């Protein structure tokens, strides 16, 4: 399924006010403590935009919807309604300045991942002690939280420990206790549902915010290929035995390609070939279908995806 003309590379809508354009989402404020969150098809890694992937925004929005609906008993989330396959109307939260990353395996390739740090010889990482002799992609005895700062405006995420979070006043003790316990419960639910689908949820990140009453609310998205590392259970054992990366449903397909050809934090990015972009689109679609158990139906209405989004958000133009 390749439709290079059906790409939402941006959602700049001048009729909506108070914009914030992130790496992946284009957002606008609404009255009554609400926000419009539009998932573009941009894909980011290494704190940069790498490409635009057909249908990625729809996949992520609808997959996050699946997970929000399957974890609402664990934690309240920010969703109010879905006016478009790429759009969430959400509560306007004060985002907590800490990203909560939960890891169940020794994996990753970025500067904040535990695998490269372990391979450099570190044995105390994020305040957690690791024994010698662990192999790439080994399961951890129990999932751990490896928090980072929440980067804004081109800054880089920085590793934190629980002591750092409290000593720097990033969260109160009660907030830290709540988000850490909630994150571990969400991860356990995610791993359980993934396992039922023949998948391994290796690691993921969560973002939380507070509403006007100070209640902690789950924000952003959860358990999607952009925020999580999914492996195919059928194939993990062989890859682990061979010392290779397990077959995955995450954005490492492009991230690894770029990382093999340059220093992605400093060099100009190579042009990503069209066949790799199409393959990545199919990865997202396959992930949606595998995780949710539902067929992916792309929304082909409107002359372009942006036209469709504008039409579905027209009722909010005067409200903004």
Image: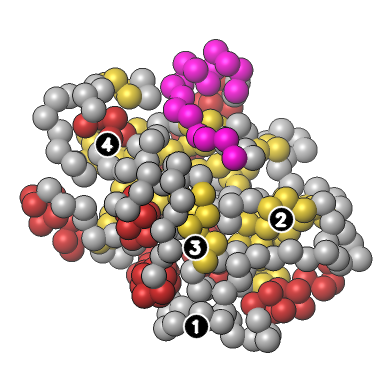
Residue 289 percent across, percent down from the top left: 39, 73
Mark 1 to mark 3: distance in Å? 15 Å
Res. 168 mark: none
Could you tell me which residue is drawn at 89 percent across and 62 percent down?
A: 319
Instruction: Please say whether residue 2 is visible from this viewpoint.
Output: yes
Q: Locate residue 55, reporting x and y percent.
A: 52, 73
Q: Nearer the viewer, mark 4 or mark 1?
A: 1
Q: CA distance from mark 2 to mark 4?
A: 34 Å
What residue range appears in magenta? 154-170
Rendered image coloring scheme: secondary structure
Q: Quadrant of residue 218?
A: top right
Q: Earlier in the sequence, mark 3 or mark 2?
A: 2
Relative image position of residue 295 (x, y in whole percent)? 43, 80
Residue that sits furthest to the left in the current view: 241
Q: Secondary structure at mark 1?
A: loop
- Residue behind mark 3: 51
Q: Nearer the viewer, residue 77 or 237?
A: 237
Residue that carries the numbered disc 2 in the rendered image: 27
* Crowd tier of the residue under label 1, counting other residues whose Cα lies within 10 Å: few below 14, some 14–19, many 20 or above: few
Q: Residue furthest front?
A: 268
Q: For residue 65, what is the image quadrant?
A: bottom right
């Amino acid at each position: 399924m390749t439709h290079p003309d059906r790409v939402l590379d941006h959602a700049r809508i001048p009729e909506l006010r108070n914009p914030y354009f992130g790496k992946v989402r284009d957002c606008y404020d609404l009255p009554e403590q609400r926000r419009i969150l539009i998932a573009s098809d941009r894909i980011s890694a290494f704190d940069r935009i790498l490409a635009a992937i057909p249908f990625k925004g729809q996949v992520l929005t609808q997959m996050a919807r699946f997970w929000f609906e399957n974890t609402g008993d664990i934690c309240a989330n920010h969703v109010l309604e879905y006016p478009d396959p790429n759009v969430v109307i959400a509560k306007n939260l004060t985002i907590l300045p800490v990203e909560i990353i939960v890891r169940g395996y020794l994996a990753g390739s970025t500067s904040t991942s535990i695998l490269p740090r372990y391979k450099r010889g570190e044995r105390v990482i994020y305040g957690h002690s690791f024994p010698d002799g662990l192999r790439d992609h080994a399961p951890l005895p129990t999932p751990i939280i490896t928090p980072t700062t929440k980067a804004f405006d081109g800054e880089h995420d920085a590793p934190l420990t629980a002591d750092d979070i409290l000593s720097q006043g990033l969260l109160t003790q009660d907030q830290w206790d709540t988000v850490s316990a909630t994150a571990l419960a969400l991860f356990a639910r995610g791993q359980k549902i993934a396992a039922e689908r023949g998948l391994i949820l290796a690691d993921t990140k969560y973002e939380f915010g507070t509403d006007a009453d100070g209640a902690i609310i789950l924000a952003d998205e959860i358990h999607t290929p952009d925020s999580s590392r999914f492996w195919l259970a059928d194939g993990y054992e062989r890859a682990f035995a061979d010392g290779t990366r397990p077959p995955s449903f995450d954005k490492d397909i492009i991230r690894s390609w770029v990382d093999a050809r340059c220093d992605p934090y400093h060099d100009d990015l190579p042009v990503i070939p069209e066949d790799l972009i199409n393959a990545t689109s199919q990865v997202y679609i396959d992930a949606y279908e595998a995780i949710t158990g539902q067929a992916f139906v792309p929304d082909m209405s409107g002359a372009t995806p942006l036209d469709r989004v504008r039409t579905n958000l027209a009722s909010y133009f005067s409200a903004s």
